[in-house]
Amino acid sequence: MYSGNNRLYSSSCIRFIIFLLSLCLSQVANAQSTFRITGRVIDSVTRQSIEYTTLTISDRITKKVVSGAITDTSGQFVVQSIQSGIYSISIEFIGYRKKIIDSVAVTAKNVPLGTILLSPAGQTLKAVTISGSAPIIENKIDKLVYNAANDITAQGGMALDILKKVPQVNVDIDGNVELQGNANIRFLINGKPSSVFGNSITDALAAIPASQIKSIEVITSPGAKYDAQGTGGIINIILKDNKIQGINGSINLSGGTRLNNASANLNVRHGCWGINTYLSGNKQIPSHTPATQDRLSTDNAGGVTHLVQDGYTDFARDGYQGGIGFDWSITKHDNITASLSYNHYGNGGSGITRIIEDSVGIAVPAITRNATSNFHTNSIDASLNYKKEFKKEGQELNMLYSTSIGRPHSDYSQTLTSDLNNLPYNGTISNNPGTDNEQAISIDYTHPVSSKVNVEAGAKAQLQDITSIADVNDLTPLSHDYVHDAGQSYHLRYNRQVYAAYGSVSMPLSSFLKIKAGLRYEHTNTKIDFPNTSVPAYNSLMPSLTFSHDFTNGFIKLSYSRRLERPDYGDINPFLNRSDPYNITTGNPFLKPEIGNNTELGLNKSLGKSGNVYIALIERINTQDHKRITTFYPEYQAGDSVLTNVSVTNVQNTGTEYNTGINVSGSYNIKEKLSLRGNVFATHRYLMTSIGSGNIDAGIRLRVNLNISYVFPHNLVAEAFGNYNSATNNIQGRSPQNISYTMAFRKQFWDKKASIGVTATNLFNEYTRQVTTINSGSYTSYSVRSVPYRSVGISFTYKFGKLEFKKNKDEENYLNNQPVMGG
């Protein structure tokens, strides 16, 4: 599998595994005499989970407080490191009657308290702030949770700004997202797919305001319950809601040198039902981006052509969205939730490029290219979910139907004018409307066989139907009219059905080790009516396996999952994008799915009030790997036209890629008001491929970020954040590095109902220089873009309502990032 060059880093990984296991065993040795208490807190009327409920554990005889916990978003709690004895447990949450469970005997390794009911206090409350100590980052057995509501540096930004700070996630300067070095990610909103991600993930993430995001879940080794799509894993964006009784909401405004946005949230809850609604809009100020390309190409006769393109593009984005959600607890065991949202986002740009060509030593008169391109999409998303809880704790049935109706549209135009003649001699106009309709229905059942053994099973059907119209018109130089190009114009239909079923079981193998094993089966059938193109149906078996052990204030896990990346419509669509006639992009109808085998060995350890640390070894092996490949053609047939001296780029199956790496993330409170939080992610890449010169040792990829926070008096908080992404060696060249830094302040006033924040990014550098190289033997390209990345912005937030909910315990405890332990 690996060449001799890879033995050194393989042996290093083995040594590090031994170190991790040794550390784990030492922790286990210290934990043998301790016990834990578990349970769940819910509302006695609505039967809804109550998050951030405070539990206090006291010695029944001495009355001394020995431990405590706070419930998570599902109402669950785990109290670790309890010695044997008899305790009194106090459960409190604002708006509910205090409950005390007396004489809890702790004599077993795990003491389950089951479901605890809290009764509403039954009185009207004045305006009050509810507090909880949810950390910014929570490391759990099955996922990492980034609580975005605590992130002040991204308050006036978008989802992309938050993702830049999430451990193991990399976002480049153009907004392309990778998870553990893999760009094939399954994005979800509130656990559901959306067609807004089907056309341009970057534009979709640039249209979601940070103020609307409650948290981001990162799942690198998804279990059998999750869709198998996405070899990189799953990123689930959880939008804000509020389950507190009463009326409350917020208004967020921000403006700056690069981006302006506004959003509003309103939540209404009474008894067993609740409604939440939101509205937002954003617009990016047009950015002027200079760019040059210097390339050499060799034709079949050995003639060399030197081509230089030098120009600029003015580019802008915009978006708006709105939605409403409803939930109703019909009975204490039956709950219905529904949602409806409308989304719009788009981008557009125009530019002028000067082209100088020297072919076989003969200079060609300079050419000027005028080009424009636009893209936008509108979509309606709807979902209906029914949840049935049975009398047996943990036994439940979930049924979900979701649909997404998208209307993408793109167009471009370009003309070429020679210095010898002021009139265009070549040009193309393309108009591309389309539809993207998706539906999904799923059923999931969870059955606790015993207090320690749990079984899950389910089935799902996903249906996607896309139509795309390519209407291409070419310029006729003599008449200066545009004539329909029948050779490139078409009406394309794309249809995909995915049917899935899964089963999983979780149970202890011993008092030391727990296991969760699952298997998912998926059948994929894809049809595309492009001439002479047939995509075969295929079946996929996707196993997942996790071994875990909890010890004092931490856990260790070893997980494996098999994933796949189905070629999406954009990767398959053979339409030729000729907005740059010298650099064409297209799809590959014969692209096969990428298969990913992901293994992770992770250790999570709490340092108490001082912070926490998470260390993981990662091995990711992708077969039939997807990579963008550029091929040079001295002559290329495009419909009825023959193009000369062009490069064509599409996605191809390039072979097998190995990524072996380490991830270290954590936080540390230096003082009561000063805290550091950071992440280092490094992977070694080795590519086995027949493209170009063959197998490639791509070296180390490094991603580092560091966050420092300080709490000043008078409700003033300051943060600074820096991010470094190293350059990346590819099959055909090198992708650029990226360095960014952000500084932010937030001041609260009006009894903490309002706040003003100031954010500055790359303040001392107007442009970020991006160098990309391509080398494919007969073709070399050196491209430089100067991306305007400097920005300064100000944001204003106002919260209203009888009950205001914040995750921070209080401003003085803003920096306490102790994670929830266990799973």
Image (spheres, grey):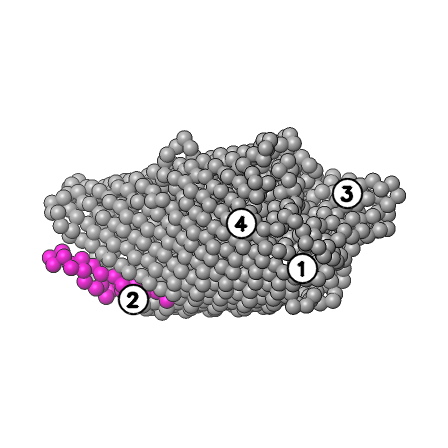
Q: Earlier in the sequence, mark 4 or mark 1?
A: 1
Q: Are marks 3 and 2 in contact (CB under 8 Å)?
A: no
Callout 4 crowding tier (Cα within 10 Å): few <14, some 14–19, many ≥20: many
Front-most of residues 816 and 756? 756
Labels 4, 3: front one: 4
Query: What's the CA distance linking mark 4 and mark 1?
Result: 23 Å
Which amino acid does the dot numbered 3 rest on?
Ser
The residue indicated by pointer 2 is 490
Image coords of residue 372 (percent x, y): 27, 51
Residue 78 location in percent, x, y?
73, 49
Mark closer to the observer (4, 2):
4
Secondary structure under the numbered disc 4 in the rendered image:
strand
Towards the viewer: 110 or 16: 110
Label 4 to label 2, Cα distance in Å?
48 Å
Q: Which tag is nearer the camera, tag 3 or tag 2?
A: 3
Q: Amino acid at mark 1?
A: Gln
Disc 3 versus disc 2: distance between alpha carbons? 68 Å
**Residue drawn where x is 19% and y is 49% of the image:** 416
**Left or right placement of residue 98 versus residue 665 in this view:** right
Question: Residues in magenta?
Answer: 467-489
Residue that carries the numbered disc 4 in the rendered image: 250
Question: Mark 4–mark 1 contact, CB under 8 Å?
Answer: no
**Residue under the image location 34 percent in, 38 percent down:** 786
| Residue 750 in the image, given as x and y percentages of width and height | 56, 40
**Alpha carbons under labels 4 and 3: distance apart:** 35 Å
Q: Earlier in the sequence, mark 4 or mark 3?
A: 3
First in sequence: mark 1 vs mark 2:
1
Magenta stretch, main secondary structure, is: strand
Q: Is residue 292 left or right of residue 458?
A: left
Q: How many marks?
A: 4
Task: Please give the label number shown on residue 67.
Answer: 3
Read off the residue under disc 1. Answer: 48
